[in-house]
Amino acid sequence: MPLVKSKLLRINRIESCHDPRNPNSGAVMQKAGLFYEGTARQADKNNQEGFCDACYYAILSEDWRAAI
């Protein structure tokens, strides 16, 4: 088995989006510390109706550091 070295990832931004018709997903993102950034119209595709809006949430590394 090859040896895998552990590396520290230097991530500046984590983002996620959800369908606005599922507000519980947004609540999970907020609970995880992400901030609501806005809704993009017809920015995603779903299995039922084709294109749908997407609510975007994100957190920056500086926000995360300030919270810990």
Image (tube, helix red, strand yellow):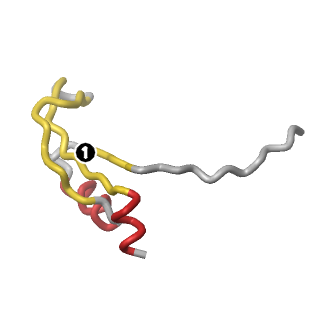
Q: Residue sitting at 33 percent across and 47 percent down?
A: 15
Amino acid on which the number 1 mark rests in the picture? His
Q: Is residue 64 above or below residue 13?
A: below
Q: Residue sitting at 39 percent across and 65 percent down?
A: 64
Instruction: Count the labels in the image.
Output: 1
Quarter in which the N terminus is drawn: top right
Q: Tell me residue 8's x, y (percent).
A: 62, 53
Q: Choose top left, top right, bottom left or bottom right for residue 43.
A: top left
Q: Residue sitting at 85 percent across and 43 percent down?
A: 3
Q: Tell me residue 37's x, y (percent).
A: 18, 51
Q: Give the residue pinned by disc 1.
A: 18
**Foreground of the two, 46 or 48:** 46
Q: Is residue 1 above or below residue 9?
A: above
Q: Tell me residue 30's x, y (percent).
A: 27, 63
The outermost residue toward the top is: 50
**Foreground of the two, 10 or 35:** 10
The outermost residue toward the bottom is: 68
The outermost residue toward the left is: 41
Q: Choose top left, top right, bottom left or bottom right for residue 42.
A: top left
Is 47 displayed left or right of 8 in the figure?
A: left
Category of crowding for the residue at label 1, using alpha-carbon neighbours closer than 10 angstroms: few (below 14), some (14–19), many (at least 20): some
Q: Is residue 49 above or below residue 13?
A: above
Quarter in which the C terminus is drawn: bottom left
Q: Residue sitting at 23 percent across and 28 percent down?
A: 45
Disc 1 element:
strand
Is 22 displayed left or right of 67 in the figure?
A: left
Is 10 displayed left or right of 64 in the figure?
A: right
Q: Choose top left, top right, bottom left or bottom right for residue 24.
A: bottom left
